[in-house]
Amino acid sequence: MKKEMRIKKNKDFQEAFQKGRSFANRQFVVYALSKEEQPFFRIGLSVSKKIGNAVMRNQIKRYIRQTILELTDQLMDGNDYVIIARKPTSEMDFFDVKKSLTHVLKVGKVLRK
């Protein structure tokens, strides 16, 4: 994922939490904040230390990034997305993560048909 497509600053995370709309399932919480002046979407990831050690957290983040990469053409541009992984993701493989994340994005109506 390109650098300009990532959310890194705390200010951007806080703005998404406060002004964005959220949708969730058991494994993920996603905050979506519309930004019309932005020609592309940006992704921010949050995986808590409660989920596991650094190896596990990095693996989950790699799974999420790969899923987003595969869904790039379906995600709506001009949005910031903050994805928070919940505890059950620690027992999931890539295909489970992809299925669950696709589901929560469809619930939030941010995927194109």
Image: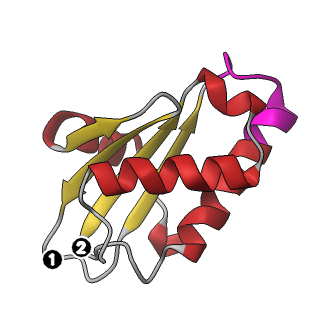
Q: Tell me which segment is drawn in magenta.
A: 49-58
- The amino acid type found where label 1 is placed reads Glu
- Residue 70 placement, left or right of 73: right
Q: CA distance from mark 1 to mark 2?
A: 7 Å
Whether residue 49 is visible here, answered yes or no, is: yes
- Residue 61 placement, left or right of 7: right
Residue at mark 1? 37
Image vertical order of residue 4 relative to residue 83, above or below? below
Give the label, 1 or 2, closer to the camera.
2
Name which residue lies at 31% across and 59% down.
80
Q: Which mark is residue 83?
A: none
x then y, percent, for residue 40: 33, 79
Magenta stretch: includes residue 53? yes
Q: How is the image coloured?
A: secondary structure
- The amino acid type found where label 2 is placed reads Gly
Dividing the picture into quarters, in which one does residue 15 lie?
top left
State yes or no: discs 1 and 2 in contact (Cβ < 8 Å): yes
Name which residue lies at 50% across and 50% down.
101
Dividing the picture into quarters, in which one does residue 75 lie?
bottom left
Whether residue 2 is visible here, answered yes or no, is: no
- Residue 82 placement, left or right of 38: right
Dividing the picture into quarters, in which one does residue 22 lie?
top left
Image vertical order of residue 30 relative to residue 39, above or below? above
Secondary structure of the residue carrying numbered label 2: loop
x then y, percent, for residue 62: 72, 55
**Quarter of the figure that contains the N terminus:** bottom right
Image vertical order of residue 83 relative to residue 81, above or below? above
Residue at mark 2? 78
Name which residue lies at 29% across and 39% down.
23
Name which residue lies at 66% across and 65% down.
66
